[in-house]
Image (tube, rainbow, N blue to C red):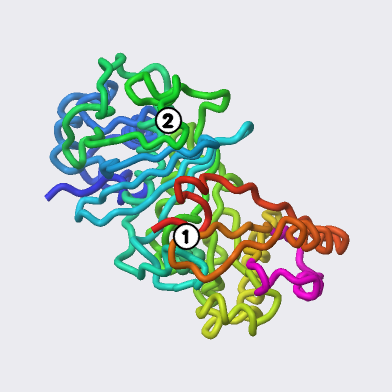
Amino acid sequence: MKQGILNLSREEVAEFLADKGAPKYRTNQLFTWLFRFGKTDFSEMTNIDLSLRRALDEWFYIYRPRIVRSDKSIDGTIKFLLELADKNTIETVFIPETKRNTICVSSQVGCAIGCRFCNTGYHGFIRNLLPEEIVSQFLIVKDYLDLWHSQTRPPPKPPQSDLLLGDTEHRSGVYSNVHEHSSTGSTKEETDCGRLVRGSTERLSNIVFMGMGEPLLNHKNVLKSIDLLMSGEKDGISRRKITLSTSGIADILKNIAKDLPCRLAVSLHAPNDSIRSKIMPINNVHNIKSILGACEEYKKYHEYLKITFEYLLLDGINDSKECAQELLRLLSNQTCKVNLIQFNSWQGSQFKASSRNKTLEFARILEDGGIEAPIRARRGEDIMAACGQLK
Ligand code: SF4
């Protein structure tokens, strides 16, 4: 039976090929085709000799999920609904900005953590994602936006109406039944085979593990996928551009702190255990003290990477001046940043966003106390792609 090559690390591929008698440089060539040129067919890897290409095709497949649907926000954010081989679905979000393009990836189908403010948690947990299912979220967005290296860009496809490309085969890297649902209506950008015309930033520069799921509860596959994303030949993403966001599974964070090669963001959302437990039941298992202890362990190995604490402002719950002052005291000896997040509502949620004035006041108290506290811009709210809205 064929294996998914994107489930193997670079070292595992090298070892496999060495066992088959292939020289070491073949691994580099293979990774270049996979991660620099986005190839999904071994026969197109033309600098690898024909017999090895045929053998690769017998041993491996190159995974892509199927894009079921893509919705484009008025602010340019695109949310993808992806179908996996077992028909489960996940969501991935592309967030374009002036100086960078970020992709927000999922690490699980659903989530078991059950944060009260989160649509994903509300719908429960199904299963962990495989490395190939994590990495391919990044790859398929590059396919969709045509961001691969120009030398291998395929010839233009004839325009089609509803379909982006023709028929599909699940693992062949093409799409089927893809519909654009732009909140801005049909734009000029979307008329070229449904593809977006590329903007000034032509790379996917940043990856955040802030989609569906708790990455630390799938840490083996998540670490392998980060390794793959960083090891992509030349176009590999730097560790500084990858952020793993966790609700704070303290014992796992402590255990893998040394091996976590990227930035860390912790969803704190409250200045004390009493408030946090009300909105994040996981706090009854991993309280704030244990999480900050695990963060110390991470800092031992990553002094140069500042930790971000995420703080979702919920009206009347955690947004008072007193909460801001308590948070300031809690984090007074941390070298960190606090990202203030405005709540994005979803059907069935019991919370309301804090007012603009309260949000600004909260930020001012933290900033006056010496903690950087940017208010994160809302992105993709109109297509339910914003923080906490994925399901
Ligand atoms: S916020 Fe994150 S950890 Fe909490 S339920 Fe949602 S996906 Fe899970």
**Disc 1 element:** loop
Q: Mark 1 points at which residue?
A: 346
- State which region is magenta: 314-338
| Mark identifier at residue 19 | none
Q: Name the residue under label 2.
A: 185
Seen at 42% across and 59% down, the residue is 212
Answer whether residue 334 is magenta in the image: yes
**Disc 2 element:** loop
Seen at 38% across and 38% down, the residue is 139
Q: Hey, what amino acid is under mark 2?
A: Gly
Seen at 54% across and 60% down, the residue is 245
Above or below, 278 against 306 in this view is below
The crowding category of the residue bearing disc 2, from other C-alpha atoms within 10 Å (few below 14, some 14 to 19, many at least 20), is: few
Percent from the top left, x then y, of residue 170? 19, 42
Answer whether residue 29 is magenta in the image: no
Q: Do the residues labelled 2 and 1 touch (CB within 8 Å)?
A: no
Seen at 36% across and 39% down, the residue is 70
